[in-house]
Structure formats: structure tokens, C-alpha cells
Amino acid sequence: MIPGQASAPRSIVVQPRATDGTGAGLQLIPETHRSWDPLHYVLMFPYGTDGFHLDSQKQGTNDKSVSAMEYYCYRFMQRDGLNVVLRGCHLFQQYVVDACAKIEQQRLDFIRFNQSNLRSDIYSGVADAVLANDGDRAGRRIVLPASFTGGSRYMHRLFQDAMAIVRRYGKPHLFVTFTCNVQWAVARDSVVTV
């Protein structure tokens, strides 16, 4: 990221070797490239096998591509035998965070590039901007639907649902929280050992 730049795409910069032994130009590997995971997590991909990419197809179908969520769900699945990814400790945690970032970015890209299919024209974007005193910044808006987790419409829908429950059943009398310690005998007895 360049200083002063608000955001930058996540990518890896590599300099491939030329056939005559001299250095070739720099090459940018975006996070959706098949080599991004093996280049960033060398210990988890010791043989350089492909990571997630946009062109991976589901087996048995020619028209469906694998989403980032489906790919990483498959990678994180615990199976018989050794799964190197699950034994990565802190590196595995970073890999999970990067996978979540890729999944979220793929969802946001889908929403951004499919605004006409999502019927974003029915949302009153200009009216929302004027009500929020943002009239001078009104332009092309990307509308997040209520189904996008964490968006303002999603949070508003949750609030409306909570208020409907209060209206129907009255104010809550108890606020119950649960705490669990993994060292408790009850917790240890209920955990299945692998």
C-alpha cells in the first residue's frame, strides 16, 4: 500500500526469472489468482498446489464455478488422515482470516457488479443521502441488500425484528449469558477426542 492511499487491492509482487538469467519485470499476483495461496502460505502448500481461483469448476458440472466459501469450507473440513492446513497453529489462524476476507470481498464484488439484477433502483439512494446530510456526496451508490450480513439494512432489519418481539411479548425480564471454561469436567467430558 502506498502512503496516503485509502485502500489498495491485496496482491503479491513477484519478479520471475527470465530464460537468459536476467531479471524480468515485476508481476502482480491478485488474491483471486490460483498461485496467491501457495505464494503467501508456503508452509501450507509445500508442493505449490493451486489455491482458490475464480475459474475453478465444480466436478460434474460445466456451468457452475466454486465460490470462495465453498472452496475454503472444503479446505477446512476435518477428514481422516493428515490435513496440513488444520495443523498450522498461528499460521492457520492467519489463513482463516485471509479466507474470510476473500469470501467477504467476493460477496461485495457480486453485489457491486450485479446492482441491476438486485433491483437497487427501488432503494431511494438520493433520499437516503439527503436525510443523512450527505447530499453533496450523492453519486453512484452501491446498495447493500438486507441479506448482506453487517450492512445497515441488515442491522435495521434485526432491530425491527427485536422491536416486534418486544411489542408482542413485552419487555424482557431477564438478560441471560452463559460462560464456559474448557477446564470444567462437564465441558471436558462432552468433547469428543480425535
Image: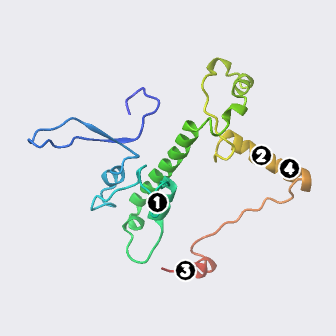
Which of marks 4 and 2 precedes in the sequence? 2
Left-right relation of 29 to 127: left
Q: CA distance from mark 1 to mark 4?
A: 42 Å
Residue assigned mark 1? 58
Looking at the rendered structure, which numbered label has been put on residue 75? Answer: none
Work out whether residue 191 or residue 83 is closer to the camera in this orientation and state it. Answer: 83
Q: Position of residue 157 (x, y in %)?
A: 75, 45
Q: CA distance from mark 2 to mark 4?
A: 9 Å
Q: Nearer the viewer, mark 1 or mark 3?
A: 1
Which of marks 4 and 1 precedes in the sequence? 1
Residue assigned mark 2? 159
Work out whether residue 4 or residue 138 is closer to the camera in this orientation and state it. Answer: 138
Q: Is residue 170 visible?
A: no
Q: CA distance from mark 3 to mark 2?
A: 37 Å
Identify the amino acid type marked 3: Val
Which of marks 2 and 1 precedes in the sequence? 1
Residue assigned mark 3? 192
Identify the amino acid type marked 2: Phe
Judged from the image, the secondary structure of the residue bearing numbered disc 3 is: loop
Q: CA distance from mark 4 to mark 3?
A: 40 Å
- Quarter location, residue 150: top right
Label 1 neighbourhood size at 10 Å, few (<14), some (14-19), many (20+)?
some
Which of marks 2 and 3 precedes in the sequence? 2
Residue farthest toward the top in the current orientation of the protein: 136
User: Which residue is at 34% across, 61% downward?
Assistant: 44
Residue assigned mark 4? 164
Q: Nearer the viewer, mark 1 or mark 2?
A: 1
Identify the amino acid type marked 4: Ala
